[in-house]
Image (tube, helix red, strand yellow):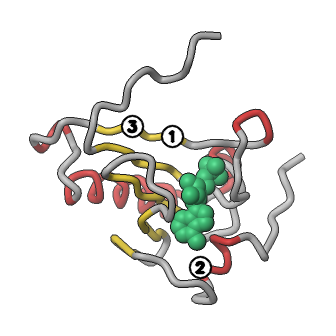
Amino acid sequence: MPYAYDDQNIFARILRGEIPNRTVMETPHTLVFHDIRPHAPVHVLVIPKGRYVTFDDFAARASAEELVDFHRTAAAVCESLGVSPGAGGAGYRAIANAGPDSNQEVPHYHLHLLGGRNMGALLPPA
Ligand code: AMP
């Protein structure tokens, strides 16, 4: 049973132009913008323009075109922000929260890209 999509979520409103954002990159299927409460010197959010709630929802239902566009755009952003190890950057962390146990705040799929400093341990020990 997929998580129901809420058209009033804040990223849906950003996509409709109802709320401003600091856009980093935009394609027909994907938008990248700065996180409003950055956790690192580089903290951007990559979102599909389609109505997907989580990573697994997007991975299961998006078209091949959307999937390729999303990931190629994320790669281009990593390079343009200077964090891609393959392009001489010091690296980054990609995080996707999904559902209550992850404390997902915005129910529109988004990939956090964080970098510009050492990101430390993945999580505290269990
Ligand atoms: P998550 O907990 O994975 O759902 O993360 C949601 C992220 O969205 C958080 O890092 C917030 O700081 C960020 N966020 C919430 N509202 C906005 C906004 N209007 N513009 C940019 N980022 C936002």
Type of residue at label 2? Ile
Q: What element does badge 1 sit on?
A: strand
Cβ of mark 1 under 8 Å from ligand 1: the answer is: yes
Q: Name which residue lies at 44% across and 54% down.
A: 38
Circle on res. 93: 3
Instruction: Kindly identify which numbered label has been placed on residue 51.
Output: none
Check contact, mark 3 vs mark 2: CB within 8 A. Answer: no
Q: Closer to the N terminus: mark 2 or mark 1? A: 2
Q: Amino acid at mark 1?
A: Ile
1 and 3 marks in contact (CB < 8 Å): yes
In the picture as drawn, the residue positioned furthest to the top comes out as 126
Q: Would the CB of label 2 be found within 8 Å of ligand 1?
A: yes
Q: Quadrant of residue 119?
A: top left
Is any atom of residue 58 visible in this view?
no
Disc number for residue 14: 2
Residue identified by numbered label 1: 95
Q: Mark 2 packing: few (<14 Cα in 10 Å), some, or many (20+)? A: some
Q: Is residue 85 visible?
A: yes
Q: Residues within 10 Å of mark 3 (few under 14, many from 20)?
A: some
Residue that protrudes farthest toward the right in the picture: 1
- Residue drawn 37% across the image and 46% down it: 40
Which residue: 50% across, 56% down?
67
